[in-house]
Amino acid sequence: MPESSTNITVVDNFFRAVERGDVDAVRGIYASDVAIWHNDGAGDQGLEDNLVVLGLLGGAIHGMRFDVTRRADVGAGVFQQHVLRGQLPDGEQVGLDAAMYIAVNDRKITRIEEYFDVATVTHLINAAKNATDEEV
């Protein structure tokens, strides 16, 4: 399908909201029963838990952006490969390669399956938590 498909538009809106740290916009893009799965062995994550993580990362990764390297509308959703880039509060540059399948139904994201390097994501989350603790 062409890049201008409805699914691509929904996914673009999602990533732009995450880049802005706009958790409310992400909430509006997600279906109420959205399930987010990561390859970390923790099982599915629900809406509220995912929004907490996105808010934490959005507050700690300055200049966050997703450089898309591959994207395809696959009918019921979008497959995407990207590199998450930005800067941690200590100045460290972030470069996390990831691949995602994002299921879209009725212009809402209903499921995400995300593959990434677990050690790198753990480092990012710990840096974000440390930054939050320092601001309190």
Image (cartoon, rainbow, N blue to C red):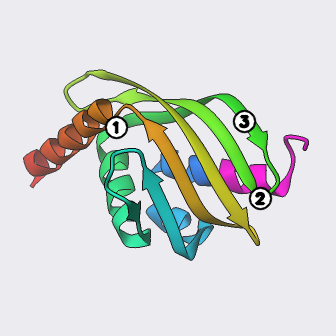
Q: Which residue does the image show at 76% across and 72% down from the upper left?
A: 106
User: Callout 3: few (<14), some (14-19), or many (20+) C-alpha neighbours within 10 Å?
Assistant: some
Q: Is residue 44 magenta?
A: no
116, 6: nearer the viewer: 116
User: Callout 2: few (<14), some (14-19), or many (20+) C-alpha neighbours within 10 Å?
Assistant: few
Q: Residue 67: in sight, yes or no? A: yes
Q: Image quadrant for the N terminus?
A: top right
Question: In the rendered view, does 82 fall on the left or right side of 136?
Answer: right
Q: Which residue does the image show at 13% across and 49% down from the upper left?
A: 135
According to the picture, the residue beneath numbered tag 3 turns out to be 71
Where is residue 45? Give x, y as percent.
39, 64
Where is residue 71? Give x, y as percent.
72, 35
Where is residue 93? Give x, y as percent.
34, 21
Q: Image quadrant for the C terminus?
A: bottom left
According to the picture, the residue beneath numbered tag 1 turns out to be 61
Q: Which residues are magenta?
A: 1-12
Question: In the rendered view, does 9 fall on the left or right side of 15?
Answer: right
According to the picture, the residue beneath numbered tag 2 turns out to be 76
Disc 1 is placed on an element classified as loop
Q: Are marks 1 and 3 in contact (CB under 8 Å)?
A: no
Q: CA distance from mark 3 to mark 2?
A: 14 Å
Whichever of callouts 3 and 2 sits on the residue coming sooner in the sequence is 3
